[in-house]
Image (cartoon, grey):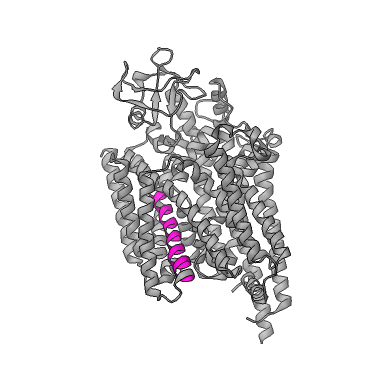
Amino acid sequence: MSSQTLTYLFVTLSFVLYAAIAIWSRAGNTKDFYVANSGVGPVANGMATAADWMSAASFISLAGIIAFMGYSSSVYLIGWTGGYVILALMLAPYLRKFGKFTVPDFIATRYYSKKARMVAVIALIIVSFTYIAGQMRGVGIVFSHFLEVPINTGILIGMTIVFIYAVLGGMKGITYTQVAQYCIMIFAYLVPAIYISMMVTGSPIPQIGLGATVIGSEDSVLERLDSVLSDLGFQEYTATVRSKIDMAAITMALMLGTAGLPHVIVRFFTVPKVSDARKSAAYALLFIAILYTTAPAVGAFARLNFIDTVHNTPYKDAPNWIKQWEEVGLIAWVDKNNDGVMNYGPGKPFEGKLEFKGDDEGVLGERIVLNDVSSNQNEIYVDRDIMVLANPAIAGLPNWVIALVAAGGLAAALSTAAGLLLVISSAISHDLIRETFAAKISDRTELLLARIAAATAICIAGYLGINPPGFVAEVVALAFGLAASSLFPPIVLGIFTKRINDLGAITGMVIGLLTTSTYIFYYKFLNPNLNIQENWFFGISPEGFGIVGALINLLAAILVSMVTKPPNQNIHKLVDNIRLPN
Amino acid sequence: MEIHSNEQKLYWKTNMRIMAILLMIWFLVSFGFSIIFIDNLNELNFFGFKFGFWWAQQGSIFVFVVLVFVYAALMNRVDKEYQEKVKGRHE
């Protein structure tokens, strides 16, 4: 069967599976809808958390980022996994013991304040929506590349699927669907990785293959990559280029952001006991680590294979996948020295954002790019997001592997989108409507409202996916900084101190969110040309600034609390209570 | 809820100590080995990897997984001791 037919088959089968699970695990009341009746086993919850957490960005983009950044990409690897250590040790067990539905619930109760709830809800909605727009875009990209439907149709199909199981099943439906999605996703990630590792090094374990010797040579994969790259004029793959302070700041901001992301935290409300929350955080990290330790191998092999097959190859002999990705505009070639050969090197081959001259072809059949060429030798433009998707084709793997990767990418994007939609809908129906404006509504009405809120959120997310604001990709990474600087400090302070009061927490959240978003906005949107290391505050880039925002939040909360009225005895009892096991 | 002050304090102190030790290891492998001391560690070869690079792309993550499982296991034991003591008081 052709890879096209197989892709249709795999994707359809996986969608039928998700829909079936959704019908089987329909939510009957608000507790089902928000926290799956706190009845999910720790291993299943760990898997669901891992699927929820690993988005299209992890599945599609991570290995590509590693391939092109080398050592500097470690900030993502360490940051996005190390955050789970903080989550497991400092947040999950206590929030489970607290035992309500949402993150704003905790902040409102611990800081006995409706205003604190409002601030938390606003922070939560900003963080979740920026995140979700990127997911819908991921769904669209996978659809358009593999099924050859327009991106917008892809997004509509994705929206419908998520609609069915998120609106119907709530957290319960989402959780069990995510378990299935994790299995599909990890299988789809590992199969090509193992194949390629065996082809390049003979080792079936990619984590070991990354350090092993390349078949037919004396060098290890990384030595080979270092020397090939420096021959072409790139930085060595393992070179420590980025400044240590910025590496540390970004890593820390990603860690605290991970631990402060509402759609991750809320997972730990779904297990039966405190001990299950700890166990489930551990399993979540284990399941995430399987993908995150494979990604560096995938990235390195992909970069090596890419250079081997592309550099110095005449364009007329270019493999089929190059033409395929050229058609969708994610690869481009211009023959700067008129030798008919593709020359790869450092620097951008073109000036500005890529624009093609319709479907017109050059002498050798390549698509014509309208942009001015740059002065360097590099003739090849390649979008790093294609690395995982193109990898099976680059390595010449069988068609069913290519189809599997498409189903895996969709599973990754849909599972994260569904988890985010749920926290947005519970923030609206539970935190805003029930707790703030209309306390008297019945459970059934609240459930209906939660479903309407989820449906509305899906429509907005779909709209953002179809009409993405130009800065989506940038903002998704920055959402971590915002989560780190707004939600993380009040939660941790609320658990580990009794002295922080309502005013302190509110001031901290507001100041943390404002300073971080101002810094990001200034360098990313107002003055992008000033966005260089010399200008940064202590050499910390906008991506890493979340850690500064978190510290400011923390200090403000402590200072304000010191000079205002301490919390009363009930709060002391509450804190004592959440610190103890069941 | 009844307050068993001494048991509570002991429980919390034990928890904090375990947490502090594990977080120190967490900091050492991620910020220490993978960022601060990487250039020194990169002098060593580890199964074909520069050792610092291995910590930054693989090693830290393995250690993180071990840390969270160790925490879950240790705290289960501490929970049990606490619950038995509190129960003993009631009888």
Q: Is residue A172 left or right of residue A346?
A: left
Locate residue A270, reporting x and y percent: 48, 66
Locate residue A366, reporting x and y percent: 33, 21
Q: Residue furthest bottom?
A: B91
Q: Is residue A41 above or below residue A533?
A: below
The range drawn in magenta is A411-435
Q: Residue at x 51, y 60 (%)?
A: A121
Q: Quadrant of the N terminus of chain A?
A: top left
Number of numbered markers:
0
Quarter of the image where one finds residue B56: top right
Q: Quadrant of the C terminus of chain A?
A: bottom right
Quarter of the image where one finds residue A572: bottom right
Q: Residue at x 39, y 64 (%)?
A: A170
Q: Is A273 in front, or is A480?
A: A480
Locate residue A332, reporting x and y percent: 39, 25
Magenta stretch, main secondary structure class: helix
